[in-house]
Image (cartoon, rainbow, N blue to C red):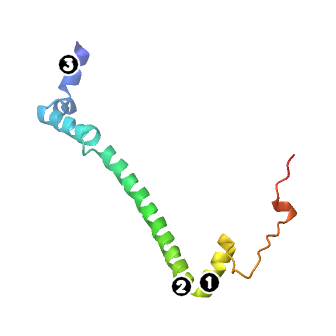
Amino acid sequence: MGFFKNIRAKRWFKFITNTYVLILIFFVIWMLLFDSNSYLIHKELNEDIDALEQNKEFYQNEIRKDQEFIKKLSDSFELEKFAREKYYLKRDSEDIYIIEVEDSVKKDE
């Protein structure tokens, strides 16, 4: 019993057990951890925003590259070169020969 009386007599114990202080502590803990606007949720949302901004930068760079490629293909010689290399297209009077290097052919084992 004497131990609890000594603790109750301390100034900090009286301050912490004050009703207003207890309500304030409960409110702060609730707002930081449990509320729908809590710090943890804000932290998670900020991480999502950062990831989306990185995706945005990546896709903007890809759009820039594609726009440059489209601009390059507006030239008829570049368009013909692309069609020949990518889709093996040819003119009516031409024949296409595909030469395979031995390293590029898969061997059946």
What residue sits 63% from the left and 77% below the top? 82
Name the residue nearer the viewer: 51 or 99. Answer: 99
Q: Above or below — where is 86 with respect to 34?
A: below
Residue indicated by mark 1: 78
- Circles 2 and 1, Cβ within 8 Å, touching? The answer is yes
Q: Position of residue 99 (x, y in %)?
A: 82, 69
Amino acid type indicated by mark 2: Ser
- Specify which label sits upstream in the sequence, 3 or 1: 3
Residue indicated by mark 3: 5
- Specify the farthest residue to the top: 1
Residue indicated by mark 2: 74
Q: CA distance from mark 2 to mark 1?
A: 8 Å
Q: CA distance from mark 3 to mark 1?
A: 92 Å
Q: Position of residue 105 (x, y in %)?
A: 82, 58
Amino acid type indicated by mark 3: Lys
What residue sits 60% from the left and 81% below the top? 79
- Determine whether the residue tagged by mark 3 lies in a helix, strand or loop: helix
Q: Above or below — where is 91 with respect to 40?
A: below
Check disc 2: other Cα within 10 Å, few if <14, some if 14-19, many if 20+.
few
What residue sits 66% from the left and 71% below the top? 86
